[in-house]
Amino acid sequence: MPKLTILEERCKSCGLCIEFCPKGCLGFTDKFNAQGYRPVAWVKAEDCNGCAICARMCPDVVIEVMK
Ligand code: SF4
Ligand code: SF4
């Protein structure tokens, strides 16, 4: 199973990774980071195929995918 690392403090809640994940694995959390944004979480990890589209789409290099 792939592994995702999300650097929550860097996330700016732009939503690009959520929009482009083909499996609907990502969603916003209810908490806020120090910048005042709600960071993304890997909410449906079991459906992730490790494609790393989320990591490539993120302009702030928040997500790392390891297969
Ligand atoms: S690696 Fe692919 S399937 Fe997994 S969360 Fe990222 S975009 Fe979605
Ligand atoms: S693309 Fe990056 S900055 Fe935008 S919501 Fe996703 S993790 Fe956060």
Image: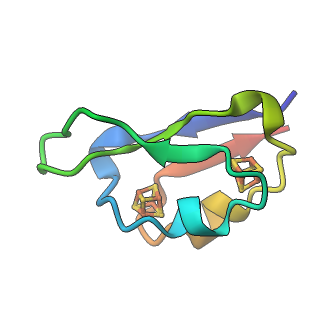
Instruction: Please name the residue shown 77% across and 52% down the image.
Output: 23
The N terminus appears in which quarter of the rendering? top right
- The colour scheme used to paint the residues is rainbow
Apparent side of residue 8 relative to residue 49 in the rendered image (left or right): left
Residue 22 on image: x %, y %: 77, 61
Q: Is residue 49 above or below residue 44?
A: below
The C terminus appears in which quarter of the rendering? top right
Looking at the picture, tell me which residue is in the foreground, 23 or 1.
23
Residue 6 on image: x %, y %: 49, 39
Looking at the picture, tell me which residue is in the foreground, 57 or 46.
46
Instruction: Please name the residue shown 33% across and 59% down the image.
Output: 13
Residue 17 on image: x %, y %: 56, 62
Looking at the picture, tell me which residue is in the foreground, 50 or 48.
48
- Quarter of the view holding residue 53: bottom right
Residue 51 on image: x %, y %: 83, 55
Q: Is residue 9 above or below residue 18?
A: above
Instruction: Please name the residue shown 51% across and 70% down the image.
Output: 16
Instruction: Please name the residue shown 58% across and 46% down the image.
Output: 26
Q: Is residue 14 above or below residue 1?
A: below
